[in-house]
Image: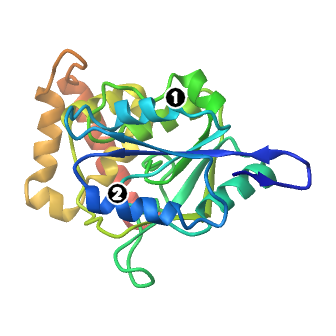
C-alpha cells in the first residue's frame, strides 16, 4: 500500500529487518508493522541466526530484494510507532527528503529514555534502528560496507552519503521504540577502525563520546584506545602511535568542551 498526496505522487516503502535469534522480539516488531496507519509495501526479514554474518550483510540482502522507492530500516527488537510509515511518507512528500533519521525511544513507553543524538553531535549518530533511504541513493553508494560486524555500518553509510553530497533530514516525528535497549555501548575494534578510516575528522566526535570520568577510571577508555593501536586483520590496519595521540588528545578536548556546553 502507498500514500498518495496532492501532487499525485505515490510513495511506497519497503521495511528491512535483520534478525538474529530473537523470535519473540521479532514477532513483536512484526505485529507493530501490521498495525500501521499506512502499510509498507513489503516487510523483508533476513535471518542471520545460522550464519552470523552481521547486520550489514543482512541489510544489503534485504533492501536489494525489494522494489519500493523508499527503504526503511529497523531492528528485530524494535517497535515502530503506529504512524511510522505514514510519517516517513509525509516527510518524503513534504520535504522532498533524501535520507531520514528518526527518533528512537527506550524503556517503558511514555516513561523511558531516548537514543536520540546528543544536541552537540553532528556525526556520532544515524542508527539503523530508525533510518530511511531512497533506493537510488543506496544503489549509488553500494549499500552497507560488509566488512563491518555488529555495529558502525550504519554510521559509515550515512557518512559516505553526506560526503557524496546527500542530505540527511532529522525527523523526530518518525518514531521507533527500542524497549529492551540497555544503553550499553558496543565496541568492536574492526568496526571502530573502519569508521575511523572512513572519515578521520568525523570520527573525532565518536571518540569524544567514549570519554567520561567513568570510562577513564574504570579502564574502558584505555582498553578502547589500545585496541585501535593493536588490532588488525585482513580488512583493516591499526592506527599509528602518532595518529592515536592526535586522535585522543583532540577527543579529550572536545569531550571537555561538550561537557560544559561549549
Q: Is residue 138 above or below residue 11?
A: above
Write the residue at 42% across / 36% down: 59
Q: Is residue 87 above or below residue 124?
A: below
Q: Position of residue 257 (x, y in %)?
A: 40, 59
Within the image, what quadrant is residue 138 found in? top right
User: In the structure shown, which secondary structural element does the residue marked by tag 1 occupy?
Assistant: helix
| Residue lying at the far top of the rendered structure | 234
Residue 26, disc: 2
Q: Upstream in the sequence, badge 1 or badge 2? A: 2
Give the CA separation, mark 1 to mark 2: 21 Å
Within the image, what quadrant is residue 9 found in? top right
Number of marks: 2
Sort mark 1 into few (<14), some (14-19) or many (20+) by Cα contacts within 10 Å: some
Write the residue at 21% across / 45% down: 187
Within the image, what quadrant is residue 174 found in? bottom right
**Of 246 and 95, the residue lying toward us:** 95
Residue 64 vs residue 240: left or right? right
Q: Position of residue 17 (x, y in %)?
A: 42, 46
Sort mark 2 into few (<14), some (14-19) or many (20+) by Cα contacts within 10 Å: many
Q: Position of residue 43 (x, y in %)?
A: 51, 47
**Of 103 and 117, the residue lying toward us:** 103
Write the residue at 61% across / 52% down: 40
User: In the structure shown, which secondary structural element does the residue marked by tag 2 occupy?
Assistant: helix
Q: Position of residue 129 (x, y in %)?
A: 43, 53
Residue with the mark numbered 1: 64
Write the residue at 8% across / 53% down: 219
Amino acid at each position: 500500500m502507498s500514500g498518495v498526496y496532492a501532487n499525485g505522487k505515490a510513495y511506497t516503502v519497503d521495511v528491512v529487518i535483520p534478525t538474529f535469534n530473537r523470535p519473540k522480539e521479532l514477532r513483536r516488531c512484526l505485529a507493530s508493522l501490521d498495525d500501521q496507519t499506512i502499510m509498507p509495501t513489503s516487510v523483508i526479514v533476513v535471518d542471520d541466526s545460522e550464519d552470523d554474518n552481521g547486520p550489514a550483510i543482512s541489510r544489503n540482502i534485504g533492501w536489494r530484494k525489494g522494489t519500493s522507492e523508499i527503504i526503511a530500516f529497523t531492528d528485530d527488537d524494535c517497535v515502530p510507532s503506529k504512524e511510522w510509515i505514514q510519517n516517513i511518507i509525509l516527510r518524503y512528500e513534504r520535504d522532498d527528503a533524501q535520507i531520514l533519521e528518526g527518533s528512537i525511544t527506550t524503556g517503558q513507553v511514555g516513561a523511558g529514555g531516548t537514543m536520540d543524538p546528543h544536541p552537540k553531535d553532528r556525526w556520532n549518530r544515524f542508527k539503523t534502528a530508525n533510518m530511511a533511504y531512497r533506493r537510488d541513493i543506496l544503489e549509488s553508494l553500494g549499500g552497507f560496507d560488509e566488512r563491518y560486524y555488529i555495529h558502525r555500518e550504519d554510521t559509515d553509510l550515512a557518512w559516505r552519503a553526506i560526503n557524496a553530497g546527500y542530505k540527511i533530514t532529522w525527523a523526530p516525528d518518525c518514531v521507533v521504540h527500542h524497549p529492551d535497549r540497555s544503553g550499553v555501548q558496543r565496541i568492536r575494534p574492526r568496526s571502530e577502525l573502519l569508521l575511523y578510516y572512513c572519515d578521520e575528522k568525523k570520527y573525532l566526535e565518536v571518540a569524544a563520546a567514549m570519554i567520561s570520568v567513568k570510562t577513564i577510571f574504570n579502564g574502558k577508555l584505555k582498553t578502547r584506545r589500545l585496541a585501535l593501536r593493536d588490532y588488525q586483520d585482513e580488512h583493516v590496519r591499526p592506527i599509528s602511535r602518532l595518529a592515536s595521540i592526535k586522535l585522543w588528545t583532540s577527543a579529550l578536548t572536545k569531550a571537555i568542551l561538550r561537557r560544559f556546553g561549549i
